[in-house]
Amino acid sequence: MLIDDHSEADLVTLGHVPAMRDYLADLWGRREFAVVVPFNDVRVQNMNTKLGPLWHVINPIMQIAVYWIIFGVVLDVSRGMDNYLGFLIVGVLLFTLSSRVLLDSVRAMERDEGLIRSVQFPRALLPISAVIEQTMAFVPAAGVLLVALLLTGEVPDVSWLAFPFILFIQFLINIGLGLVGARAGFAVRDLSQIISHVIRMLFYFSGVIFEVSRYVEDPALLKFFALNPFYDILVVARWSLVNGELLVWPVLGFFAYATILPAVGMRFFVKAEHRYGG
Amino acid sequence: MSDRIPAAIIEDLHVSYRAYEDPKRNLRGFTMKRHEGLRQTRVHAVRGVSLTIYEGETLGIIGANGSGKSTLMVAMTGLMPIDSGSLRVRSRPRLLSVNAALRPAVSGRRNIIIGGLALGIALAEVTERMDEIIDFVNIGEAIDRPMRTYSSGQRSRLGFAIATMSPPDILLVDEALVVGDEEFKARSQEKIDEIVKGAGAVVIISHSLPDIRENTDRAIWMHHGEIAAEGDPNEVVDAYVAMVHEDREERARRDHENGSAPE
């Protein structure tokens, strides 16, 4: 049978793990999904409540208030820090952002099973959209964060300019966490139960409410803390906003996780591409 | 034949998958651990299929249950690892399985947007075509109700409309689709014809032999993971019917012999 050479040449081969380049191009082609769908999800989130979208602002304020009453007033773990409230605000809000990403992504594949079964698209779109949704929901919280810091008497300096960049790096780490979390949560459903306990543990190992370097004096042990990306994020963000100490290992960890986690996470996630939805 | 452009070329394709056998529990079954009782076997479902699918044709696939039809379909989407052979396509074929609600909690209208964007269609285009799509789905006010409240018929209408929003190069239709009423069947047939006219290829699995005779240009008959016959739909269906008929007679004769055998 005669077949036009030209037409046969542009057929693509299937049946193997998709080439990463093609996969990413496919994802890029769906970028509108990753903006429009999360935006709408955030918009309708509190529609059935009386205060509606105001909750995106009220929630972080109440969160700060609760932690401040417990740890700042009742337990007083400040140990004479200059601006403990400012320290606490940065810690609580940024930790919450990344922990929500973890919590959300382990359920992402299960939640959108129907979409996976009905339409074909690169599945990594789902955890990435989940991360973008959490990031969008964080925008009002970031406003609260900055206003609250000013109210605590913090004076903006040059290092504040680094904050948007730091948030972007945290976003990259979150993408990595989201991709790993999504496949892990899909493979082991029980993870959605375990994850909230893991996050509670991380909360204490990330120095959200106390400064780790004041409690841990052994420098070798401090290096060990830097293995925790949540801790690294908080150290760098506190340097930027509340004159926190810039420690070498957490800074290295911060950038290392931002480069390694998304790449490793993407590979890890795509390996199971054909199994999602099943 | 030389002017026909291939949309997919399948060469000597072998596909198998793992399955677990659960043997009958015997006394030993009580003493052994759970996983010991589960024997893993490989089901060699597609055994050396070679097939070229051309642009602008509708191909029907018939065959008994377990003949490898569905496995071949899923393998063609590229979402299942293949053992050997090759599978080359114009673009990743789209498999229609429209039994699931996309996002059960949101309205049909919203699901059209979500599904369209997931397919890579621009938001502006989805919005522009919204009325036309809603008209095609034709489920009245239900379009603004959450998808979880839909009947299976309404769900498959919406699912079909969304999945065919952007005409795929190759559309794979499993029989499960044909659940709608006569009126919707006609509408979806129109849509399929549209895709074929736009130089797409459509592959249909069906147990409805009249459907295959009427609506396909070519048919293949799958038997034990291989292609038993290929060609004109009427001839292939006739051959298949003759075989089924023969099988049944053979079985009846055997049963009869066994029944009349002396005890």
Image (spheres, rainbow, N blue to C red):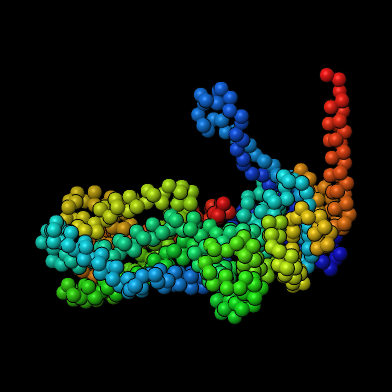
State the residue in front, B23 or A172.
Answer: B23
Can residue A252 be seen here?
Answer: no
Percent position (x, y) of residue A244?
A: 21, 65
Q: Quadrant of residue A265?
A: bottom left
State the residue in front, A225 or A6.
Answer: A225
Can residue B130 be seen here?
Answer: yes
Quadrant holding the N terminus of chain B: bottom right
Residue under the image location 39 percent in, 49 percent down: A193
Residue under the image location 34 percent in, 59 percent down: A99
State the residue in front, A92 or A173.
Answer: A92
Q: Residue furthest left?
A: A80
Q: Is residue A197 above or below residue B125?
A: above
Quadrant holding the C terminus of chain B: top right
Left or right position of B51 against B105: right
**Number of marks drawn:** 0
Left or right position of A111 against B121: left
Percent position (x, y) of residue A39?
A: 44, 72
Left or right position of A188 against B3: left
Residue under the image location 87 percent in, 33 percent down: B253
Q: Quadrant of residue B52?
A: bottom right
Percent position (x, y) of residue B10?
A: 74, 55
Residue under the image location 32 percent in, 71 percent down: A55
State the residue in front, A19 or B81.
Answer: B81
